[in-house]
Image (tube, rainbow, N blue to C red):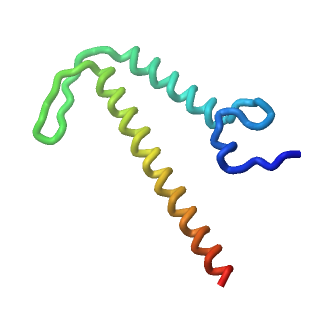
């Protein structure tokens, strides 16, 4: 039996050659987003603050999806960093 370190857990495949469930969920969500975006191609008015644009609905949906992914990723990374810092502080406290 081999020990799996943290870096190996981030790979899309686990030690047994099976795909990580997070990768499957990500692929399914991305595929559904692409289908949804491609089915909505009408021209729409998008108003933001003082600006107004007439663009394809697909562009607005794509923009919202990308912004949601970026914000979600950023929040997740901040949460992981805070968790890691707390664990490091706790380990330093135990060594003293």
Coordinates of residue 86 in the picture (x, y in percent) = 56, 69
Image quadrant in which you'd find residue 44: top left
Residue farthest left in this picture? 50
Kindly identify the residue that appears in the image at 45 percent across and 45 percent down.
72
Residue 68 coordinates in the image, percent (x, y)? 40, 39
For this view, does 79 lie left or right of residue 54? Answer: right
Q: Is residue 13 above or below residue 74?
A: above
In which quadrant will I find the C terminus?
Answer: bottom right
Measured as percent of width and height from the top left, residue 93 is found at 62, 80
Q: Position of residue 2 (x, y in %)?
A: 84, 46
User: In front: 52, or 85?
Assistant: 85
Q: What is the quadrant of residue 91 in the picture? A: bottom right
Image quadrant of residue 94? Answer: bottom right
Residue at horizontal 65 percent and vertical 33 percent from the top: 12
Is 17 placed above or below 76 here? above
What residue is drawn where x is 38% and y is 33%?
66
Residue 38 in the figure: left or right of residue 30: left
């Amino acid at each position: 039996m081999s020990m799996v370190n943290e870096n190996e857990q981030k790979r899309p495949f686990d030690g047994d050659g099976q795909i990580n469930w997070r990768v499957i969920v990500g692929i399914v969500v991305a595929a559904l987003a692409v289908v949804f975006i491609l089915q909505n191609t009408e021209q729409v008015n998008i108003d933001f603050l003082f600006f107004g644009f007439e663009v394809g609905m697909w562009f607005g949906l794509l923009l919202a999806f990308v912004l949601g992914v970026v914000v979600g990723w950023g929040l997740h990374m901040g949460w992981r960093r805070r968790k890691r810092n707390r664990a490091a502080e706790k380990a330093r406290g135990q060594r003293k």
